[in-house]
Amino acid sequence: DQQVKQNSPSLSVQEGRISILNCDYTNSMFDYFLWYKKYPAEGPTFLISISSIKDKNEDGRFTVFLNKSAKHLSLHIVPSQPGDSAVYFCAASARREGGKLIFGQGTELSVKP
Amino acid sequence: NAGVTQTPKFQVLKTGQSMTLQCAQDMNHEYMSWYRQDPGMGLRLIHYSVGAGITDQGEVPNGYNVSRSTTEDFPLRLLSAAPSQTSVYFCASSYDPGFSGNTIYFGEGSWLTVV
């Protein structure tokens, strides 16, 4: 049973426009949510995170929104740049479950010039 | 400061062979974990450890064995390799497991093919 789901395997966006990546989860024990970015042949790198007590966290061009009632979070990238093209993974952890970090399937973002 | 080092980077195994993927970190992190990445499946947690001598199963532990005799090393053993274990494997370490995200460091990955 996939506890963290990213239902869109790919997303294509024009440079300068907004990219919105979505993520759904099922485990109500999750108290921390994170987004990772991954380039081919490299390990994932941390992008941005949000605690379950917040509904928004912003870092430069990246904003993460959390809707706990819907068990849904999203990552907004504004404006999108060609260098943002990568696979983005949503992840979640539950402190009371030992802090295991559970990842979604990933969404491949392509930003076209 | 090497961070998280995985070896080997590439390996081809025959079905039934055994091998160990090595993972070492030099940051004195207590928390270490192994993931596998497969197309359409994302990163799935195999095993993790919250400190030397302590290990636990993740989402897909079958066919893999781990031990944590030191803080620095967390090897992943395939006892009898199967084609279904063809994947890219990532080791990660952290002093703060998952809670703030930017404290988790991933290795560069190990590409394993089982024929």
Image (tube, coloured by chain):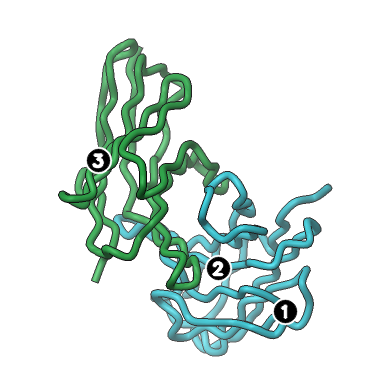
Nearer to us in this view, A108 or B16: A108
CA distance separating discs 2 and 3: 25 Å
Q: Secondary structure at mark 2?
A: strand
Q: CA distance from mark 3 to mark 1?
A: 37 Å
Q: CA distance from mark 2 to mark 1?
A: 15 Å
> In the drawing, what numbered circle is on residue A22?
3
Q: Residues within 10 Å of mark 3 (few under 14, many from 20)?
A: many
The residue carrying mark 2 is B34
Residue for badge 1: B52
Let me know if marks 3 and 1 both belong to one chain: no
Q: Are marks 2 and 3 on the same chain?
A: no
Tag 2–tag 1 contact (CB < 8 Å): no
Identify the element where label 3 is drawn. Answer: strand
Q: Please tell me in which quadrant of the rendered image residue A94 appears.
A: bottom left
Residue type at tag 2: Trp
Depth check: give the residue in front, B91 or A110. Answer: B91
Q: Residue at x 25, y 57 (%)?
A: A25
> In the rendered image, what is the letter of the chain coloured green?
A
> Does residue A52 appear left or right of residue B28 in this picture?
left
Picture layout, residue B14 above or below residue B33: below
Residue A45 lies left or right of residue A9; in this view the side is right
N-terminal-most mark, 2 or 1: 2
Q: Chain of mark 1?
A: B
Give the image location of residue B68, x and y in percent: 70, 80
Badge 3 amino acid: Asn
User: SS at mark 1?
Assistant: loop
Query: Residue B51, position in %: x, y?
Result: 68, 75
| Circle 2 chain | B
Q: Give the vertical position of A15 relative to B71 (above or below).
A: above
What hue does chain B carry in this figure?
cyan
The quarter in which the C terminus of chain A is drawn is top left
